[in-house]
Amino acid sequence: MELIISPFWAKLVLWFNPFNRIMVMCRGYSEDYKNFTELVWDDDKHLDFFDRTSYPQFQLWLT
């Protein structure tokens, strides 16, 4: 299941993710605008979530 979410919710869920079944995915990560890339808090906490040009879409994926 995939759910489109706002940058605010993407950052909040990524920061406080008590479940292993929820993945925060981002389009535009490493200039990949075709595919989604999974975000990990330890690696991506300094990402500018509100830069819509660089990161146009966030999704929650349930596994």
Image (cartoon, helix red, strand yellow):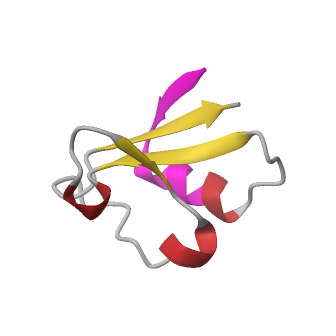
* Residue 31 coordinates in the image, percent (x, y): 20, 58
Which of the 4 image quadrants contains residue 2? top right
Left or right: residue 54 versus residue 18 is left
Residue at horizontal 21%, vertical 45%? 33
Which of the 4 image quadrants contains residue 48? bottom left
Q: Quadrant of the N terminus?
A: top right
Residue 54 sits inside the magenta stretch: no
How many labels sit on residues? Answer: 0
Q: Which region of the structure is painted magenta?
A: 1-12
In this view, 54 is above or below 42: above
- Looking at the image, the residue that sits furthest to the top is 1
In this view, 60 is above or below 20: above
- Looking at the image, the residue that sits furthest to the right is 18
Q: Quadrant of the C terminus?
A: top right
* Residue 19 coordinates in the image, percent (x, y): 82, 47
Residue at horizontal 66%, vertical 65%? 15
- Looking at the image, the residue that sits furthest to the left is 53
Residue at horizontal 40%, vertical 72%? 47
Residue at horizontal 27%, vertical 63%? 30
Residue 9 sits inside the magenta stretch: yes
* Residue 25 coordinates in the image, percent (x, y): 48, 45
* Residue 37 coordinates in the image, percent (x, y): 43, 50
